[in-house]
């Protein structure tokens, strides 16, 4: 893989780094110079891989991530390993590897330039029998012994740093968990605050609306009071008028009762008059019958006397109502009609 750009680094010292989030596995003590090497590592659940993470080769004794010898971009794990541990590997080409026999180690650096894991030291040289059984002069033995002591001290220092960093990591994980809980609580409080602000704004608008309604209702109440006064006044006038009307109605009822009695008396008188009229009509009929008989008799007598007294001038008797001597009941009828 061709290196096209510089990786993200930081000036943070090794004492402030985390070495337990990425674990390097299947490490060799020696890698043959001139050949490609493959780096194997495991991503734990405590790290979230990102696109700019990288794996570098550092000479033992480095202090910051800027001191890398070479690097390769770290591939992202598949989706199935997002929330579990994932084993990854990177191949370093021989042309980019160191050519000396110094001690080096792999380091996993995130895109913020922070160390998340480091391997045990290794060398680029061919393993020989001397690495198993060393027979050397006293000076070389002393020099090797001194190097071993230095490496042992560095190893002990690295172990101490690793234990301290693990302790710090555990403490930071707890702090991170508490921080996340606090952030969740803060987010919940913010959400509740936003809801409360919305409710408060709604209540303010509702209060303003109710105040306007209250002002309008105050005006309506005043108008209703005025209408009640007017209606009360009209009611009193109507009650007075009703009382007067009732009094007048009582008077009319009394007059009606009086007129009813007078009408009954008039009906009685009328019935009496009808009876008298019937009697008068019967008498008048009888008189007409009698008058008719008398006229027939007079006519017969006149015919009989006309033949014996022919030379005498005819004597004409006055006629009153078709009777020879007048109607004796004419005055009685006039009095009755005048009485009606």
Image (cartoon, rainbow, N blue to C red):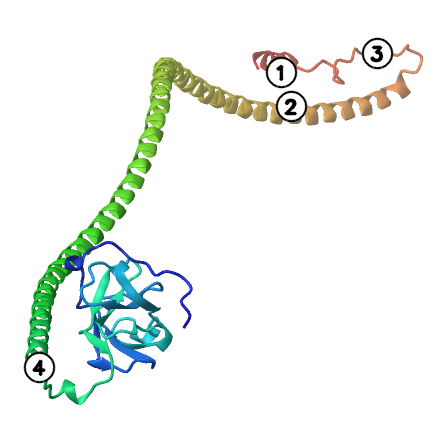
| 37 up-or-down from 176: above or below | below
**Of circles 2 and 4, which is in front?**
4
Q: How far is mark 1 from mark 3, CA to CA?
A: 28 Å
Q: How far is mark 1 from mark 2, CA to CA?
A: 10 Å
- In the picture of the structure, the residue carrying the numbered disc 3 is 316
Quarter holding residue 18? bottom left
Q: Mark 4 falls on what kind of element?
A: loop
Residues marked 3 and 4 touching at CB (< 8 Å) = no
Q: Which of the numbered marks, if any, corresponds to residue 253?
A: none
Residues marked 2 and 3 touching at CB (< 8 Å) = no
State which tag comes first along the sequence, 3 or 4: 4
The answer to whether residue 93 is visible is no
Classed neighbour count for the residue bearing mark 1: other residues with Cα under 10 Å, few (<14), some (14–19), many (≥20): some
What residue sits 50% from the left and 23% below the top? Answer: 272
Q: Quadrant of the C terminus?
A: top right
- In the picture of the structure, the residue carrying the numbered disc 1 is 333
Residues marked 2 and 4 touching at CB (< 8 Å) = no
**Of circles 1 and 3, which is in front?**
1
State which tag comes first along the sequence, 1 or 4: 4
**Of circles 1 and 2, which is in front?**
1
Q: From the top left corner, tell me how far across and down residue 194 is, in percent.
A: 29, 43
Classed neighbour count for the residue bearing mark 2: other residues with Cα under 10 Å, few (<14), some (14–19), many (≥20): some
State which tag comes first along the sequence, 1 or 2: 2
Q: How far is mark 2 from mark 4, CA to CA?
A: 198 Å
Classed neighbour count for the residue bearing mark 3: other residues with Cα under 10 Å, few (<14), some (14–19), many (≥20): few
The answer to whether residue 331 is visible is yes
- In the picture of the structure, the residue carrying the numbered disc 4 is 137
Q: Which of the numbered marks, if any, corresponds to residue 284?
A: 2
């Amino acid at each position: 893989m061709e290196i096209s750009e510089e990786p993200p680094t930081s000036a943070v010292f090794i004492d402030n780094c985390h070495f337990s989030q990425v674990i390097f596995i299947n490490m060799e003590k020696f890698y043959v110079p001139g050949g490609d090497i493959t780096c194997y590592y495991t991503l734990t659940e405590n790290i979230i891989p990102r696109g700019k993470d990288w794996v570098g080769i550092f000479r033992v004794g480095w202090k910051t991530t800027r001191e890398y010898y070479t690097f390769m971009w770290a591939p992202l794990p598949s989706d199935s390993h997002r929330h579990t541990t994932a084993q990854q590997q990177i191949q370093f080409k021989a042309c980019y590897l160191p050519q000396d026999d110094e001690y080096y180690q792999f380091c996993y650096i995130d895109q913020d330039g922070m160390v998340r894991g480091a391997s045990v030291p290794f060398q680029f040289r061919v393993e020989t029998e001397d690495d198993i059984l060393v027979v050397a002069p006293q000076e070389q033995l002393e020099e090797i012994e001194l190097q071993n002591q230095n490496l042992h001290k560095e190893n002990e220092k690295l172990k101490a740093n690793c234990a301290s960093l693990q302790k710090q990591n555990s403490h930071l994980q707890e702090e991170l968990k508490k921080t996340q809980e606090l952030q969740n609580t803060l987010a919940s409080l913010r959400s509740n605050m936003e809801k409360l602000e919305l409710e408060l704004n709604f209540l303010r608008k509702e209060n303003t609306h109710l105040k306007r309604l209250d002002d309008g209702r105050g005006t309506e109440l005043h108008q209703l009071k005025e209408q009640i006064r007017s209606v009360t006044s009209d009611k009193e006038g109507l009650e007075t008028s009703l009382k007067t009307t009732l009094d007048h109605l009582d008077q009319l009822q009394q007059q009606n009762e009086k007129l009813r009695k007078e009408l009954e008396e008039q009906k009685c008188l009328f019935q009496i008059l009808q009876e008298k009229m019937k009697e008068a009509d019967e008498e008048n009929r009888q008189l007409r019958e009698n008058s008719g008989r008398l006229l027939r008799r007079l006519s017969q007598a006149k015919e009989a006397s006309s033949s014996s007294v022919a030379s005498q001038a005819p004597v004409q008797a006055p006629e009153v109502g078709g009777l020879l001597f007048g109607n004796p009941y004419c005055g009685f009828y006039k009095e009755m009609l005048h009485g009606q």
